[in-house]
Image (cartoon, rainbow, N blue to C red):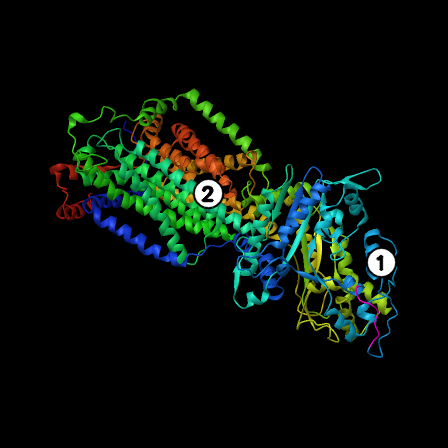
Amino acid sequence: MGETKPKDTLLSKVSNKIVGGLEQFFFRWGICITLNPSYFIIGCLAIVCISSAGLVYFRQENSPTKLWIPQNSGFVQNTDWLKDNFPTDMRIQMAIFRSENILTPHGLKWMADVQERIENSKSENGKLSWDKACYRLPVVQNSMSTRKKRSADGPDFNLDFDFSDFESKFDENVFNNTEPMYDSDFEPSVDLSQALFCELVSTFDERCFENNILEIWKYDLEKIRRLTQEEIIDGINSANASSLTGMKFDELLGGVVRNESGYIVAAESALIQLFNKINLTAIEGGASSNDVGTGEIVDQDTLLWEKALIEAFQESEINSPDFHNLYFSVARSFGDISGATILGDSRYLAVGTMVVFIYVLVMLGKFDLVENRVYLSLIGILCVAMAIFMSYGLCSLMGVFYGPVHSILPFLLLGIGIDDMFVIIQCWNNLSAEEQEFTLPVRVGTALKHAGVSITVTSITDIAAFAIGATTELPSLQSFCIYAAIGVIGTYIFQATFFVAWFTIDQKRIEAKRDGVVPCIVHNAQKRSQFREFAPLQSFFTNHYSRWITFTPVKTIIIIFTLLSLCLNAWGSYLIRQEFNPIWFLPTSSYLSKFFTAQERLYPNNGERGSIYFGSMNYNTEMLKMEKFLEDIRNQTDIISSTDSWYDGFKEFVVKKHDQDFPKNNISDIDFRIWLRQYLYSPSGAKYRIKFRFSSPLRCTDNAVPNITVSSMDFRFKLFNGPSEHLPAMMRLKTLVKNADFTSGDGIRFVWARAFASWETEEVIGHELYRNLAIAMGCVFVMTLILIANVRSCIFVLLCVTLTMVNVNGSMHFWGLTIDTVSCINLVLAIGLCVDYAAHIAHTFMIQRHESKNERARATVASMGPAVFHGGFSTFLAFIFLADSDSHVFTTFFKIFVLVVGYGLFHGLVFLPVILSLIGPEPYQDEVKNEVVRSRVNSGNEVKESEEALEFFRKNITNPL
């Protein structure tokens, strides 16, 4: 009884139609390229040149709010609102002085030397020095204390307070915490006439806004250099807080050692904070510069001064005494370092490309003067470069920005492009003895017929995975996926066209026995190398590996190992943390990374700072609600460590100076405005003026404050241990602010903290990652189903991809990685890469015509195994040198892609052949069509290398049956 032929299903009919159509197209495409290679070469170069013209619109984005945060998030909207309505005019610079004990004469002398360099720092254009760049605050107490009692010109003035010894008494009060020797109820902004007080205000001393223990000795650098150990310890323990900022001096010390009485006797470090002013007028006038990396807008002069400050710190660091370390952070540092790191580490691309070239050169050709393929290897890599230019040009033309993570794109395209090239060459080497008798155009067409379908399957699945990634809410991932999708399209087109055209030219050279390096030299057969047929990898896969993998004990070991690896990494996937920190983009060897490390160790109790903003409203009528709101905020003691609000001081001011039970007693709007003006110009309230924006500039001579358009209060979070703590804290505080019962005004109120830039990313990144992975895997299944057209094969491919992704995700945890934006991008890329290995094997298995599944699995591994291994290993070589990188982008890319290549090759070359040999599907239906094509082409040698033969081919092969 004869064998029953399987009944064609709808899917198999679609399969035969699609696969047959693709094979026919690529068969004709290969012949067409071979007959006219120069046309296709010129055409590809024209495409690159035209698309590269878009680079004139190239735009690099470094603003965190535009890179890592969904653009519909509250943080982005609030940040934009603040830039328009409450732009900050202050920037902070910090430095940490560390020694075994900084509170020594040697340590203070060192700090004084650095302070002198800071004060002498000057921008390149000479416009700004520290005294001009610093943010200045009025020193009301000291200014008043230097003035003698004088008679009033007006009848309303009656001052019976003697200022003659105010300064010494003030210093004694501040530094010794004794009772004041003057009338503590005296409030100049209230007790003096407005005209006299405002006249005094105009002459008040101003001092640079700075938190520094050197303030204890009034920044007298010569005096500081002469301090004894005893004087230093006495000064630190006698002083309480800054007379300018109110900050406690012991908060500036790290690693503090106290004696039994609680006195400070030593400290490992001292922190200084410098505040400089941004020229908002210059920014409004257009003379501004975007501070790369932070997204802040800052004037050019300020950036130049900050550059000078960095140089001053670096000079101080070089000249630091032995066993002393200086760590510093300047506002422009993040952008300077992160940008330089990405560009600097791009050198690894050149090294990786060279290594890949050598590998391709060895594996692509043969050890022979004629059959080595030096120039063809270069062409293969050139195809990747062309795809990169095409991607960058078209994306720039479309207005898609280039971000920090995009620097890994060349490595990715290099791996994918080399993979396609090896598949084409492998299919050429797999031509049967009968096929090798065809003319060159038909041989190239036949090889491309098999390779074209295979690289089409993998390229379309790659493009689908990236297209899904482009739908994400994360801007950087979205932008990268668009770049990657276009890059893969370019790689696919150029490898199937530009590379094939040069391959035909190179093959003609080989058949003419011309030298591979100097083609004008012709070698005769006697001089051919005896190593020309040396192909150890092909021999290994054909003679050894393909047989071992079908032994039953080997199959059992492979399945057991796969299950154990899956269980272990599933546990790792459960444990992996979801965390993102832009600081990771800094190289660990950079001065800024060292500063953050030192700050985290020496000042661990400092949680993130934040502010709550209120828009335009009737502040007078809302004061009771304001008090309740602030009480609710302070009650969040598990997430809030401290608050600093103008309201508290203003309430005390009104109660004390105006004898009102505020805010319970209703006061007139006029009184509220007058008293608020008095408070904001008082010694205790002056520092809060920067917390307001008014409808018109606030002046001391105004009878009352103008309408308030924005006000803010500050707070500090407690120190959190990761997203599991800070994300709920952020959401709770946002809810409190949102539900605040303020009924008047525009309703603008929100909470903002710089940390929200990363916290809001962490809030969505997990959801975005697994959503993208799930949809991408669905697309992979659909694409492979359409192109491979066999449900069982496609399920096996999807299984391999799933196993690879679970293993990669789990191993990331064990390798110290987290789920962040960079790893999210890499995992989406991983789907496109690991599907290649399995899809090549599954497709090759479907076209094998052997009797048993074991034989088909052996033939699959022998014929396609070397190409798959070459593709994976060359990808590994492309980024192996990134292991030495300081960049978080590159080190994450290296770790994840080592895992992807390792697990992808295992599941594609080891696990999948075993599964196919056990329960693999039947091969594609009849290939009679292909046999007819072969017979027609072979008989009479109708196809010649001419246009007439191509026309004959088109007429006779279009419908061979």
The local secondary structure at tag 1 comes to helix
Q: How far apart are marks 1 and 2 (CA)?
A: 59 Å
In the displayed image of the protein, which residue is found farthest to the left? Answer: 940
Q: Main secondary structure of the magenta part?
A: loop
Task: Tell me the tag on residue 345.
Answer: 2
146 horizontally vs 557: left or right: right
Q: In this view, does 369 lie above or below 889?
A: above
**Which amino acid type corresponds to the residue marked 2 in the rendered image?**
Asp
Say left or right for 342 vs 145: left
Q: Is residue 619 visible?
A: no
Q: What stretch is highlighted in magenta?
A: 146-152
Of 242 and 865, nearer the camera is: 242
Q: In which quarter of the image is residue 589?
A: top right
Pick the residue in front: 863 or 758: 758
Which sits in the foreground, 489 or 600?
Answer: 600
395 to 890, vertically: above or below? below
The residue nearer to you, when weighing 329 against 404, is 329
Residue beneath label 1, please? Answer: 169
Q: Residue at x 11, y 38 (%)?
A: 940
Give the quadrant of residue 571.
Answer: top right
Query: What amino acid is found at the position of numbered circle 1 in the picture?
Result: Lys
